[in-house]
Image (cartoon, coloured by chain):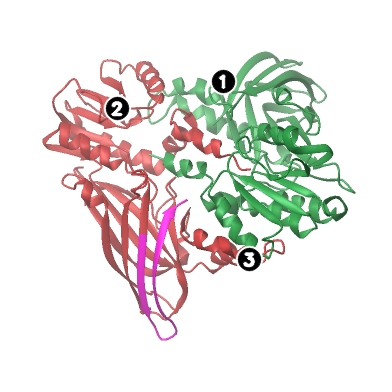
Chain colours: A green, B red
Amino acid sequence: ILCKNYFEYFNSYNYIHIHEDMIKDEVRTRTYYNAIRRNEHLIKDKIVLDVGCGTGILSFFAAKYGAKHVYSIDKSDIIYTAIKIRDANNLTDKITFIKGLAEEIELPVDKVDIIISEWMGYCLLFENMLDTVLYCRDKWLKKGGLIFPDKAYMYIAGIEDSLYREEKFDCWKNCYGLNFTPILPILKEEVVIDYVDRNFIVTDTSCILDLDLNTCTKDNLSFVSPFKLKMTKKDYLHALVIWFDVSFSACHTPISFTTGPYGAHTHWKQTVLYTTDIITAEKNETLNGLFALKKNKNNSRHIDMKLHYVFNGVHTKAKATQLFNIG
Amino acid sequence: ILCKNYFEYFNSYNYIHIHEDMIKDEVRTRTYYNAIRRNEHLIKDKIVLDVGCGTGILSFFAAKYGAKHVYSIDKSDIIYTAIKIRDANNLTDKITFIKGLAEEIELPVDKVDIIISEWMGYCLLFENMLDTVLYCRDKWLKKGGLIFPDKAYMYIAGIEDSLYREEKFDCWKNCYGLNFTPILPILKEEVVIDYVDRNFIVTDTSCILDLDLNTCTKDNLSFVSPFKLKMTKKDYLHALVIWFDVSFSACHTPISFTTGPYGAHTHWKQTVLYTTDIITAEKNETLNGLFALKKNKNNSRHIDMKLHYVFNGVHTKAKATQLFNIG
């Protein structure tokens, strides 16, 4: 039995391992660091709110680069470690840590100038922590205030993945002499969270979500987007890969990072959706589709996805609607 | 934010991914398969109980190799998939699936001849599912009945691990210009679950637990064991590695598997405990210690560990007591 409680541990966020992995995610942490230290003119003498501060690293960046005061909210016990780190760095009078849910706590100020947060989950919206950031924006961010980061984009592309697809699905026909194929319907609804080599991409890229955190609402986090993927070479199409980018558009020069196959590895990896059909495609043929994402009814922090596609090629004619969940 | 709910998902055991990983753990599944198919003389016409059956794979093995009937218990929704697989393999009249907790359900028979179960967690006892197997043994296993597997052993050895140790602990002194060392005390209490290359082992091996499932009680699952590790070469000692083996001693010829660094990779990996001291050791010098393991008071499925060691070498004299948890 693979230990479910091993995973449950992470659940509390009290365990340091998860914070270790996040801080050591160089793409993630260094981009936030650069967004703050290269923009002292935006941070200086400002009141900053850090939503879901964890070990407090973003708060320390803000305090070190000139914030007048930082208010840092987290519901996990990790905040006690954050307080010790604050004091070890002589930032005691610059940062106030508040333990609790953002939706339930009070701030000692009416408004803040800047909200910083690292709220992104797998496939951007898994965990739906963005809801909390938007709540904080609406309650505390002053008019014209800044959000770091303030733009998020989700992308989709097609991949050739014969090797892994076969390994994942074909073995069940004969599993130690047993027919295990009844497992396939649920297996096919699971997205795979893993690194996709950019060399496996066989189509161009389509943007399926363009979020402006300055103006978007909770409703924008459930969406249906059409997409069109054109084959960049003659190949097979086995799956679609989804990733996200975020950017700090208020910065003096553009600062952003990608979690996609064309960038360096991040702890978010990519999200892979296997299509029902294996598509034999010629260069320039196109897959037309719709991608829908919404909160799970039973657990608002989980997401449900729906993929619909049509392909009319010389070799393959295909059409399917599929449901997916993250697992 | 790394998605805590991604891990929570596994928690339910309804999600197929975890079962996929377990079935595809060749060392694990093939050993159970061999233990059953090579011992038809033990299984034939017997009543078998599968505790925590998951997708039912061990039940299918037992039914296919002659069991009169198999009763298979699991509390997760995965049991509905297990039922479909059973029916697809014409084993409908051979296996009864019962959804529920072993401690709460009733069996249609008074006694069973054989209990099969795959209950092992990280560091063998994480999750403490063995409690449930022992409960089933005491309630349902007939006198002289068999348990598959029925022996479990835990081992400890010393490793040289300068590279990873440095990477894990030394970076916090300067973390983007901040002193993050207040994170170290909690970081040092976390065991690391990872694969240890056998070439990093620098001592002999000591057995710290020898469990006979035919006779042991719940009390035996909390224990204190002395150990003695002799350096097999001149090297540094940075950490201790713990692993477990299980065996099916009722089999006609010995069948067992190891999850240790001297065997093939399994999904259990190994458990690494970093010592407070970096020990500079000569060949044949010895580390004397005590290893204690018990259930966590707040969550009986979690475990707490305590390590005490003394080293009196020509270069290093060291003595420490450390607490660990899995995270």
Direction right: furthest residue: A252
Residue for point 44% across, 59% down? B272
Residue for point 43% across, 47% down? B266
Q: What subunit carries mark 2?
A: B
Residue denoted by label 2: B73
Label 1 Cα neighbours within 10 Å, binned few <14 / some 14-19 / many ≥20: few
Q: Report x, y in % for residue B258.
A: 35, 51
Q: How far apart are marks 3 and 1 (CA)?
A: 44 Å
Residue denoted by label 1: A297
Q: Can residue B237 be seen in this view?
A: no
Q: Which of marks 3 and 1 is nearer the N terminus?
A: 3
Q: What subunit carries mark 3?
A: A
Residue for point 85% across, 41% down? A249
Label 3 Cα neighbours within 10 Å, binned few <14 / some 14-19 / many ≥20: some
Q: In this view, does B212 lie to the left or right of A57?
A: left
Direction left: furthest residue: B143
Q: Quadrant of the N terminus of chain B?
A: top right
Q: Report x, y in % for residue B141.
A: 15, 34
Q: What residue type is labelled 1?
A: Lys
Magenta residues?
B306-327
Q: Residue A88 carries which label?
A: 3
Q: What residue type is labelled 3?
A: Ala
Q: Report how many numbered discs are placed on residues in the image.
A: 3
Q: Distance between the residues labelled 2 and 1?
A: 29 Å
Query: Is B313 contained in the magenta span?
Result: yes
Q: Main secondary structure of the magenta part?
A: strand
Q: Can residue B291 be seen in this view?
A: yes
Q: What element carries label 1?
A: loop
Single out the mark in the foreground, 2 or 1: 1
